[in-house]
Amino acid sequence: MKINETVEKALNEQINRELYSAYLYLAMAAYLDDLNLPGAAHWMRIQAQEEIGHAMKLYDYVVERRGRVVLEGIAKPPAERKSITDVFESALRHEEEITSHINNLVDLAQEEGDHATVSMLKWFVDEQVEEEDSVDTILQKLKYLGEDGRSLITLDRELAQRQG
Ligand code: OFO
């Protein structure tokens, strides 16, 4: 069944949010590169790629349901941050916000009786649990280890291991 306009519009908005997420994480990567933390920057670059993957998953779904993808402008992400801890705290807040949007989308699809969209969104519901958890794990390490040079070098090496 062709996707209805209300759900189509909401999915297009989510595509924009996912692309903004990629842009946001790339800006965080640039800040971390500037701090000479290449491992943490690498982690954020991979995160940015994942976000493009999320956007494309929604894009492909809209096309598959004979809807129309309409791309809007992407907002400018903040360039300045206070510290690496501030970066990961902002990332966690952002992911919590995205989780709320995904939950709202599920509610909307349910209200519209769009079972296919509810089913597709299950993947995003699960993914958001992982997204929040992976950022929170890094944040806990940062809080535990602190931001002295030695701790940051250790953490940076660990973050450099992230696979795409
Ligand atoms: Fe797409 O999960 Fe993060 O934003």
Image: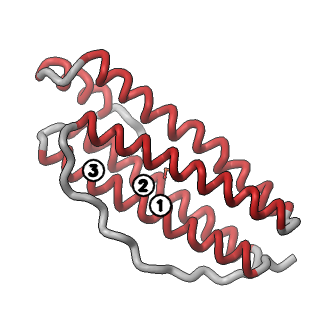
Asked if the residue under mark 1 is in contact with the one under mark 2, i.e. CB atoms within 8 Å, the reply is yes
Pick whichever of labels 1 and 3 is earlier in the sequence. Answer: 3
In this view, 15 is above or below 70? above
- Secondary structure of residue under mark 1: helix
Which is in the foreground here, disc 1 or disc 3? 3
The residue shown at (36%, 70%) is 75
Compare residues 56 and 89 and report the one nearer the observer.
Answer: 89
In this view, 61 is above or below 141? below
- Which amino acid, mark 1? Ile
The residue shown at (43%, 44%) is 93
- Secondary structure of residue under mark 2: helix
Q: Residues within 10 Å of mark 1 (few under 14, many from 20)?
A: some
- Secondary structure of residue under mark 3: helix
Find disc 1 in the rendering and name its residue: 52
- Which amino acid, mark 2? Gln
Quadrant of the image for the N terminus?
bottom right
Q: Which mark is residue 49?
A: 2
